[in-house]
Image: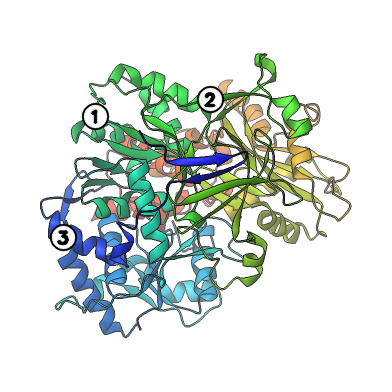
Amino acid sequence: MKTMYEYNRSVARGAAITGEYQSRRNIAGLLLEAAAKSYDKGITVIRDNGIEEYLSYPVLLEEALKRLGGLQKLGVAKGEVILLVLNDSADFILHFWACVLGGYVPAPLATPASVKAKNTPLDKILAVWRFMNKPVILTGDYLAGKQREIEELYEENGLEMVDFSNLDISKKGTVDLSGSESLAIVQYSSGSTSTPKGVMLTHENLLANLEAIIRAAQVTKDDNMLSWMPFHHDMGLIGFLLTSVAVGLKFYVMSPVRFIKKPCLWLDLMDKYRITLSGSPNFGYRLVLRQLQEKLYNWDLSSVRVIFNGAEPISVELMQEVTQKLARYKLSETAIQPVYGMAEACLAVSFPPLDEIPVIHRVDRYLLAGEMKVYESREASRTILFADEGNPVPGVEIRVMDEMGRVVAENSIGEIQIKGLNVTSGYYNNPAQNLKSFQEGWLKTGDLGYMSKGRLVVTGRIKDVIFVNGQNYYAHDIENKLEVFQKTEGGKVAVCGMHDHRDGMEKVVLFSSLKRIEGDIMEYYRRILQFINEETGIVIDCVVPLSSIPKTTSGKIQRFKMIEEFLEGKYSDSIIYPLADSNLSIKAAASSGNDAISVNPASNREVIRKIWAEILEKPAREITDTAAFTSIGGTSVKAFQMLVLLEERLEMEFSHDILIQCRTIEDMDEYIQVKRAG
C-alpha cells in the first residue's frame, strides 16, 4: 500500500488532496449529489421515545428547501449568520441544510437546560449573539417563547428568536450558493463565554477535510454510520453528518440525551443496524462500562470497523478496558482507534492505520517532566501511557516546536502546530486572538506532544485549557469569575485541569492563596466550589491551599509546575476535599440512622430528593426544595442519569423539557403534578 504521509524529524506531511470533493465548491453540492445519486439511502433519527424518523437524501433536500423558503421570507440576507439553537436532531439537520442551500452561515450552539437563571449555555448564546452583531436565533417554541424573559434576565433588548415551527414552508426556497472561499459555518468552542472563539470555516476548508476523513477512514457507500454526538460539536456535525452526506451512506442518529440515559443502547443499535463506523470521547466509554456491568447482552459487534476515540485527551487504560470488555461481543481489537483533531482543522488532523492494534507509548514520567524528552519506561511506578494518534491525514502538515520557535528533535515534546487547506484562517471578529494563534502560517494548537517516526503522540495541554466531559473551559475565565465573587485581586487562585494516569480520569484542582478571615475552612471552600459549579457547570475535585500562587518573572501563573507537583504527591498532606469530606461525615451519620428526612413514597419531592442524593452522593437532608441542581454538584451528565431514575421510580416518561424547565426539587414537583393532571 502506498504511504499516505512523509516525515522528517518532528515535521510530517499527509498525502496531497486530490480535489475530488473540491470540485463541488460548496458543501451544499454534497446534498444535491446525494439526493441525485444515493436516493435509496439517507438518515434515520432515533427519537428518545424509540420512534424512528427516516429522511432519504431526496426527502432531506426537498424538506430543507421548504425551510429555506421560510428563512428567505424572513428577509435574512445571503451571507448573514444564523445561530442554530435546535435540540431535536431532525430539526437541526433540516435547518442546517436550509441555511447552507441559501448561502447563510449557520453557527450551531447548545440548547440551555433552563432560562430561569443565568447559566453557561445561555451565557454563551447571549455572548455569541452580541459578538456576531445580533443575528437571528433559530430555535424551538420553548426558547423563543422565553425571549422577553431572557432579555429581562440579561438586561438586553433586540433579541430575535425565531420559532422554526412558525416558518412558512409552503413553497421551496431558491438555492443561492456561496463561493468556495466563502464562510460556510462558524464553529464555537465550548469554552469561554466572555470572549467567544468562533472558528471560521469556509466551504474549501470543509471539503478538504471531508476528503481527508473519507480517505483516511476508508469510508464507502457500503458503510453504516451511527452517532450520538451533538451537532454543535465538530465530531457530530462534520465527522458524522457531513461525512455521511458526502459519501451518501446510511446514517443513524441517536440524541446525546438518550445515550446518557441508556449508554448501552448505542451498542444495541450497532448490533441491530450492522454499524461499521461510530465514535465517542472518553466519558462516553465510561458511561458504557458502568451499564455494561448490569447484565450480559446478546450483541454481535463483528460488523464494526472503527469506533473513533477523540474529542478529549485519550485515556489508554480506558480504551484498553472497553476493548477487552467488548471482545466477548466480537468487537475487533483494532476497532477503537485514538485520533487527533480540533475545530480549527474542521475536525481531523491525524489518524492511525485502521487495521492495526492501537500503538501505546510507555514513557518515563520523571525524565519527561525534567527534560521534555521522551524515554521508554521499564518500571510501572515511573510509567505514563500515551496513545499514538497516527499520521497526518491527507492535506495536513504537523510540526512540533519549542518555545523559541524551532522544530524540536524527534521524541522531544513541544507545541503541536498544523497547516493545511482544511485549517481555519482565524476566529470570527477576533483579530487579537488571530495574532496569537498563528506562526509563519502555522496554527498553534496549544497542545503538547511529540513525533515518533512521523506519528503524533499528544501528551497534554499548554497553559489553561481544562477538559471535562468532552467540553473545554478556560481557566482564566473561571478564575476571573471567582475573583469577582471573592472581591479579591487577580493571581490569588489558579484552576488547573490534568489527566491523572493513576485512574485515567480528568481532574480539576483549585490552587488557592485566598486568605480566610474567619469561619471553618471546609465551609469556606464548599461555598466557593458551589459557586464555581453553578456559574460554569464544572465540579472541582479538590483544593490545594498555598501561601502564594507560583508565577514566572513576567507574572504568568506556572500551571505546569503546580500540576507536576500535584501528580508527584507534593501536596498530599495539604489537599482538602470540601464537598467530599462533608459527604463522608454525613454519610456516616446517615448510616447510623440519624438521617433527618423520613421518606414518604407518596411525596414527589421526597422521591426526587432521594434520587438527587443518590446521583450527587449527598445526604438527602442537605438538599433543600429550592436548591438548584447545578449549585450542589449537578452536571449535564448527572442530570440525564437523574432523569433515568425519575422515570423508573415514578413510572412515568419524561422528555428533555423537564431539565430545561426545572432547576429545583420544587420546580420538578410542580412539573410532575401538572403532567399527571394532564
* Residue highlighted by disc 1: 303
* Residue highlighted by disc 2: 360
The quadrant in which the C terminus is found is bottom left
Mark 2: which amino acid?
Ile
**To which quarter of the image does residue 268 belong?**
top left
Where is residue 425 shown, x and y percent of the image? 53, 65
Q: Residues within 10 Å of mark 1 (few under 14, many from 20)?
A: some
- CA distance for labels 1 and 2: 25 Å
- Looking at marks 1 and 2 on the same chain, the residue that comes earlier in the sequence is marked by 1
Mark 3: which amino acid?
Ala
**To which quarter of the image does residue 137 belong?**
bottom left
Residue 644 seen in render? yes
Q: Name the residue: 53% across, 51% down.
A: 628
Residue 367 in the image: above or below residue 451: above
Side of 464 relative to 219 (left or right): right
- CA distance for labels 3 and 1: 26 Å
Q: Nearer the viewer, mark 1 or mark 2?
A: 2
* Residue highlighted by disc 3: 35
- CA distance for labels 3 and 2: 42 Å
Side of 126 relative to 284 (left or right): right
Where is residue 475 shown, x and y percent of the image? 67, 52
**To which quarter of the image does residue 607 belong?**
top left
Side of 276 relative to 232 (left or right): left
Residue 41 in the image: above or below residue 151: above
Where is residue 670 shown, x and y percent of the image? 38, 54
